[in-house]
């Protein structure tokens, strides 16, 4: 079939309605639009989304449809199983109406890209007589581990026990495997390609990451002045003004993403670890977490620290004052720091974050991973040591050099003719000929 791009080829993209899924799907949508497709991102009506930036709708359209919940029942506070059960019934009904509406208005939907965490969406899509493709928002290394676990070719090691060897991956201990598998919360870069090739023999995958706004990768897409869709309101001006007043590479940016919740003791250790490091820090403490901050912490650290309830993370990571990112290693945060060349202190909490942290420290060598004590706590002393390792000394130089290299690789991949760009192009060509 002829490669017909433009207004006549309309595709829908459907993220799972959580922050860490909306962000990468939004960026993918803009990249698809830049390849000449008409793209509509469909969100759940209960997502209290605030759109950051001015010009979002000029590159893609965003439409919300009912998911069976009201706006004030944000997905972060819902019972997950209950949410999914209702979402599964209500969302497809309204999706059907949306597809009909576009058909009547002369923009019939040709294809649907859906989040891989809602795999049943493919049946829904096929029920509409359409086809679809899943979009994975986690690392392929993690997908490969799940695959082996499912196949029975991964034997989970015991605590403190042996390492497991999987094709194309570094040796993995129990704390490097995704927590969902374990039921508890070097020089390897070239192996990544091997992993991807290995996965490709089993699935027709296209790797198109990193899905970071193009302005941060020196590739300004047409009509792409926007930053993102946020479920929380970022303190943009406050962060910018504060960062502007600091010296280059002098600030530790601390964030644990949109879902992770630290225990009270851990929060206290983190707070005092930051204080002991004696660096400037910008710490995102979501509203639901603020009570756990030690008493008088604001007063004691007001000269060194700024605590905000939500930040414009990409702007922060791209700011020249930020010299280190203390992160829970959510896949988006990890990719954002990697793409923007920011060294990391990895403090993973659960799910795929443990595996991402392994890659940060041992595979890409762009950071240091904290060690947990026998009580499951990362102590203030440990936090201080890890921050120092990233901010000063010999290891720090190597980490910074590697971070710069990964930043360049990210740009290369996304820019014209790069691997990400070519894979996306191939995907669009296939989609158009289907
Ligand atoms: N984020 C942000 N401001 C913050 C904290 C996080 O904009 O103060 C964004 C961050 O840039 C990332 C997303 O929220 O794109 C979090 O996704 P991630 O996969 O890192 O973690 P999750 O929230 O899914 O645990």
Image (cartoon, rainbow, N blue to C red):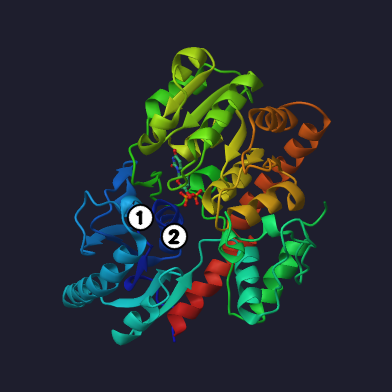
Is residue 218 among the parts visible in the rendering?
Answer: no
Label 1–label 2 contact, CB within 8 A? yes
Q: Secondary structure at mark 2?
A: helix
Which residue has dot 2 on it? 34
Badge 2 local density, few (<14 within 10 Å), some, or many (20+)?
some
Q: Is mark 2 within 8 Å of ligand 1?
A: no
Image vertical order of residue 59 relative to residue 86, above or below: above
At 57% across and 41% down in the image, what residue appears?
A: 327
Foreground residue among 330 and 376: 376
Along the line of sight, the residue nearer the viewer: 248 or 48: 48
Would you call the spot at circle 1 few (<14 residues within 10 Å), some (14-19), or many (20 or more)?
A: many
Q: Is residue 302 left or right of residue 226?
A: right
Q: Residue at x 52, y 55 (%)?
A: 211
Residue 290 at x, y percent in the picture: 40, 31
Displayed quadrant of residue 10: bottom left
- The picture places residue 89, in percent across and down from the top left corner, at 25, 74
Ligand 1 lies under 8 Å from the Cβ of mark 1: no
**Is residue 168 visible in this depiction of the protein?**
yes
Q: Nearer the viewer, residue 34 or 88?
A: 88
- Examine the rendered structure and indicate whether residue 280 appears above or below residue 356: above
The residues tagged by marks 1 and 2 sit, at their Cα atoms, a distance apart of: 8 Å
Residue 206 screen position, x and y as percent? 58, 71
Of the numbered discs 1 and 2, the one sitting upstream in the chain is 2
SS assignment at label 1: helix
Q: Is residue 50 left or right of residue 174?
A: left
Counting from the top left corner in percent of width and height, residue 265 is at 53, 34
Residue 161 falls in image quadrant:
bottom right
Q: Which mark is residue 59?
A: 1
Asked where in the image residue 98 lies, by quadrant, the reply is bottom left
- Residue found at x 73% / y 65%: 157
């Amino acid at each position: 079939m002829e490669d017909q791009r433009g207004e006549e080829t309309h595709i829908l993209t459907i993220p799972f309605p959580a922050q860490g899924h909306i962000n990468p799907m939004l960026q993918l949508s803009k990249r698809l639009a830049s390849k000449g497709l008409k793209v509509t991102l469909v969100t759940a009506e209960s997502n209290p989304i605030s759109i950051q930036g001015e010009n979002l709708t000029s590159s893609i359209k965003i439409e919300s449809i009912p998911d069976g919940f009201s706006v004030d029942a944000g997905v972060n506070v819902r019972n997950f199983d209950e949410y999914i059960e209702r979402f599964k019934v209500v969302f497809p009904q309204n999706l059907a109406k949306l597809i009909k509406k576009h058909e009547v208005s002369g923009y019939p939907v040709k294809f649907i890209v859906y989040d891989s965490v809602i795999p049943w969406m493919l049946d829904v899509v096929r029920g509409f007589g359409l086809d679809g493709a899943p979009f994975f928002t986690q690392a392929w290394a993690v997908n490969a581990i799940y695959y082996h676990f499912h196949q029975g070719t991964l034997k989970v090691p015991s605590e403190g026990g042996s390492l497991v060897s999987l094709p194309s991956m570094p040796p993995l201990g129990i704390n490097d495997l995704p927590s969902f598998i374990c039921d508890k919360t070097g020089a390897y870069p070239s192996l990544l390609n091997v992993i991807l090739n290995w996965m490709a023999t089993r699935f027709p995958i296209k790797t198109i990451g990193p899905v970071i706004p193009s302005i941060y990768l020196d590739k300004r897409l047409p009509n792409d002045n926007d930053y993102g869709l946020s479920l929380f309101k970022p303190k943009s001006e406050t962060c910018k003004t504060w960062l502007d007043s600091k010296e280059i590479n002098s600030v530790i940016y601390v964030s644990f993403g949109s879902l992770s919740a630290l225990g009270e003791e851990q929060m206290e250790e983190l707070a005092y670890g930051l204080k002991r490091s004696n660096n400037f820090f910008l710490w995102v403490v979501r509203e639901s977490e603020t009570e756990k901050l030690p008493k008088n912490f604001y007063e004691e650290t007001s000269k060194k620290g700024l605590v905000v309830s939500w930040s414009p993370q990409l702007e922060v990571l791209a700011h020249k004052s930020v010299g280190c990112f203390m992160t829970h290693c959510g896949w988006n945060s990890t990719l954002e720091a990697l793409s923007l060349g920011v060294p990391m202190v990895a403090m993973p909490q659960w799910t795929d974050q443990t595996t991402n942290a392994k890659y940060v420290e041992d595979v890409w060598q762009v950071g240091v991973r904290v060690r947990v004590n026998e009580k499951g706590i990362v102590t203030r002393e440990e936090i201080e040591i890890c921050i120092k390792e990233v901010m000063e000394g010999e290891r720090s130089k190597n980490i910074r050099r590697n971070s710069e290299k990964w930043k360049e690789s990210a740009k290369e991949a996304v820019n014209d003719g790069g691997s990400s760009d070519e894979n996306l192009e191939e995907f669009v060509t296939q989609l158009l000929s289907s």
